[in-house]
Image (tube, helix red, strand yellow):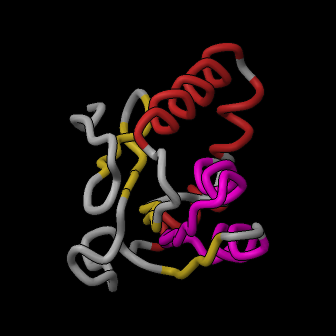
Amino acid sequence: MTFELVEHYSRTSECDRLLRSAHGRLEFLRTQELMRRVLTLQATALDVGGGTGVHARWPAGDGHSVHLVDPVPRHIEVAATLPGVTAEIGDARRLHTADNSVDAVWWPRSGGVGWRVGRSQTRRGPAIQ
């Protein structure tokens, strides 16, 4: 990762963006609603680029096992303190997760969170993109 990227994301907070404005709160709640529709069984999930864990905290609270990967060391320090969440410094282009080893994966994208559910989930749906 470039120094500039890590420096930029060390100064900003996705959690603050999602929880301080009406638009951000709506995005957060809608993402929760859609993901909870398909995460109906206890799942193992991968949160790629998950920052401090804003979208890892609630699935872990629902009983899912969440592993978060992010390039910013400060984000990993915070995310690793969340119950049910493990975290590692990493790059989305070179994940250390074995193929077919998780039930769900999500990642940040413009206008929300992209995600896919598969493997052992009984209710499968197309990715929301």
Q: Is residue 1 above or below residue 26?
A: below
Q: Is residue 110 above or below residue 12?
A: above
Work out whether residue 12 can be spotted.
no
Residue 129 image point, x, y percent = 26, 32
Question: Going 52% across and 60% down the picture, which residue do you hit?
Answer: 42
Residue 86 lies in what quarter of the image?
bottom right
The foreground one among 17 and 41 is 41
Q: Is residue 70 left or right of residue 127?
A: right
Residue 84 lies in what quarter of the image?
bottom right
Residue 94 image point, x, y percent = 27, 79
The foreground one among 93 and 64 is 64
Residue 56 image point, x, y percent = 60, 56
Question: Going 72% across and 55% down the picture, which residue do you hit?
Answer: 61
Residue 93 lies in what quarter of the image?
bottom left
Which residues are the magenta region? 55-81
Question: Going 65% across and 70% down the picture, which residue do you hit?
Answer: 85
Question: Going 33% across and 81% down the picture, which residue do you hit?
Answer: 97
Residue 74 image point, x, y percent = 69, 72
